[in-house]
Amino acid sequence: MRTPALLAAAAALTAAAVTGCSSTDTTTTSDKPTASATAAGTAPSSATAHADDVRIDTCGTDTYGAPEAKLTVTNSSSKHSDYIVEVEFIDRDGVRQSEGTAVLNNLAPGQAAKDKAIGLENVTGGFNCRVIKVTRHATL
């Protein structure tokens, strides 16, 4: 059984490893840091082999002003799987302002689950949410 500390450490290491990765497709946009975007999107196919398993439902900010991407993850594999989803929050010039991670565990085949990736740094002005990496492993 995994502990929360182990999962947090894995997410932090994954976030550090993908710094500088990018994709050319924008998934959803927030024009204001205090309002959620209404447009929904899917992860760009160039992000990873498992990007089709992730959809960004909304892109906006949480109640504290941090950038937030609300996600739906659907396990398309034939085995129970764990997911680590990396999301970047980029400004209108395409510069990454923050990033966040969502970790979902033990999704059954075909099961969908909702989670949030919350940025560590506040973003001012409009920004886009973009999935940059999806890691999927069979649950142990």
Image (cartoon, rainbow, N blue to C red):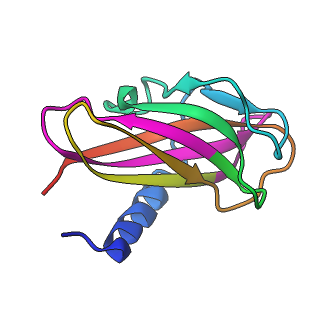
Vertical relation: 34 (above or below) 51? below
Residue 111: image x %, image y %?
28, 35
- Please say whether residue 71 is one of the residues in the magenta stretch: yes
Relative to the observer, which residue lies in front, 21 or 129? 129
Q: Residue at the spot x=57%, y=42% of the render? A: 70
- Please say whether residue 85 is one of the residues in the magenta stretch: yes
Quadrant location of the C terminus? bottom left
Residue 128: image x %, image y %?
70, 35
Is residue 118 left or right of 62 when viewed as pictured?
left
Relative to the observer, which residue lies in front, 120 or 34? 34
Is residue 139 left or right of 126 when viewed as pictured?
left
Tally of numbered tags: 0
Is residue 121 left or right of 136 when viewed as pictured?
right
Bounds of the magenta segment: 69-98
Q: Main secondary structure of the magenta part?
A: strand
> Residue 17 appears in which quarter of the rendering?
bottom left
Q: Residue at the spot x=54%, y=44% of the render? A: 87
Residue 58: image x %, image y %?
63, 35
Residue 75: image x %, image y %?
27, 35
Quadrant location of the N terminus? bottom left
Q: Residue at the spot x=64%, y=55% of the render? A: 119
> Residue 2 appears in which quarter of the rendering?
bottom left
Q: Residue at the spot x=32%, y=32% of the render? A: 50
